[in-house]
Amino acid sequence: MFVFLFLILYSQTFQKSDVYFTKEISPSKMVEMLKRLNLNLTGNVGLKIHSGEPNGLYFLKPDFLQEIYDYTNGTFIECNTAYSSVRSNTTTHKKLLNENGWTKNNRRIVIMDENPEDDFILNVKKPQIIEKNYVGGRLKEFDSCVVLSHFKGHQMGGFGGALKQLSIGFASQKGKTWIHTGGKYTDWHYAMNRAASQNDFTASMADSASTIVDYFKKGQIGFISVLANISKSCDCAGASAPVPKIHDIGILASIDPVAIDRASLDLIKNNVDVGTNDLLSQISRLKGENTVDVAEKIGVGSQDYNLINVDTNEEKSSNEEKSSNEEKSSNNNILGLNVCKFINLILILTFL
């Protein structure tokens, strides 16, 4: 019995998350990567997307996502924005969805907060900054979910990936404002001009992301990130987005949003393209990695991962993906973390 409990506690303490990787960026590969996750996509399946601005250049296009849409028999889901845009109003947002091709071939797409009065609250279990999250009422229509992210920079959060889709992406217009202001306001007109400190904002994104992970049952939410057309600008830039200066890297898939964002960041850090330093400088300046750190702290996922290359069947640990400049300090941090975990394990066993 003692050995059995020891093995359970040990595995829970030191377990890493699997992140699948392929260099091939294609509609069929998106489906293959989803299959790797072995999700239980029951009931109504939501496919969280970014609908793109007018004449947007680099958001994940609906035609690219057609195969995963067909495979899941899902519905694309999106929310209104908390900045002045055609996407901040349900009527004009729906018109844009048509213009950007989301309704082509009778594709199903839902604006989850199309009726603001239907917003509901999800409580944060381990709040760091905000204790609740406002989400659109139509989220209740969905039983499982695949979060489809275009990994790139972001002028407010430093970068955008799975965690940003879970937080700002799922939050209603009211909820987005709540996150941006660190739980001070819900009127979207205050979202930008009464913003919280950068630390509080990025931590609030982690808080809100946790509520969506908690909302869906285990095995009923997964994450796919496409690392292509990467610049320091987000898809909100629309037609004014700068030309990407980082080459396309591939597709990542995981059931852990923290691990997939960490793996994405590590792949960027190991990149030598001319635009890499600009993006990394922005992420550092805007404290983007704070979202990942806080999300791990409150139990959303783990930054320790196994990167599984489905093209070559090779597997690397997160330690091996660190850049050479960070390798020594990273290994020291991981050693210290594992020592702490081991001490905690011994303490737990002592009181059994």
Image (cartoon, grey):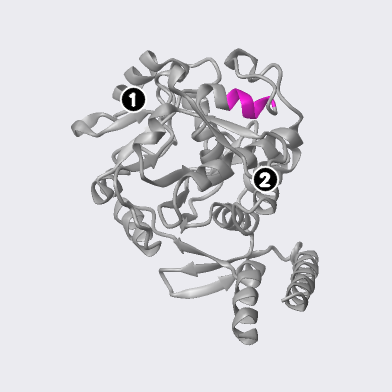
Horizontal and vertical percent position of residue 21: 47, 62
Horizontal and vertical percent position of residue 128: 72, 41
Which residue is rendered at x = 29% and y = 46% of the image? 43
**What residue does disc 2 label?**
126
Residues shaded magenta: 176-181
Horizontal and vertical percent position of residue 175: 56, 26
Name the amino acid type tagged 2.
Lys
Looking at the image, residue 347 sits to the left or right of residue 121; the answer is right
**What residue does disc 1 label?**
97
Dot 2 crowding, Cα within 10 Å, few <14, some 14–19, many 20+:
some
Which residue is rendered at x = 76% and y = 74% of the image? 351
Q: Quadrant of residue 303?
A: bottom right
Name the amino acid type tagged 1.
Leu
Which residue is rendered at x = 63% and y = 57% of the image? 266
Looking at the image, residue 119 sits to the left or right of residue 63; the answer is right
Looking at the image, residue 210 sits to the left or right of residue 99; the answer is right
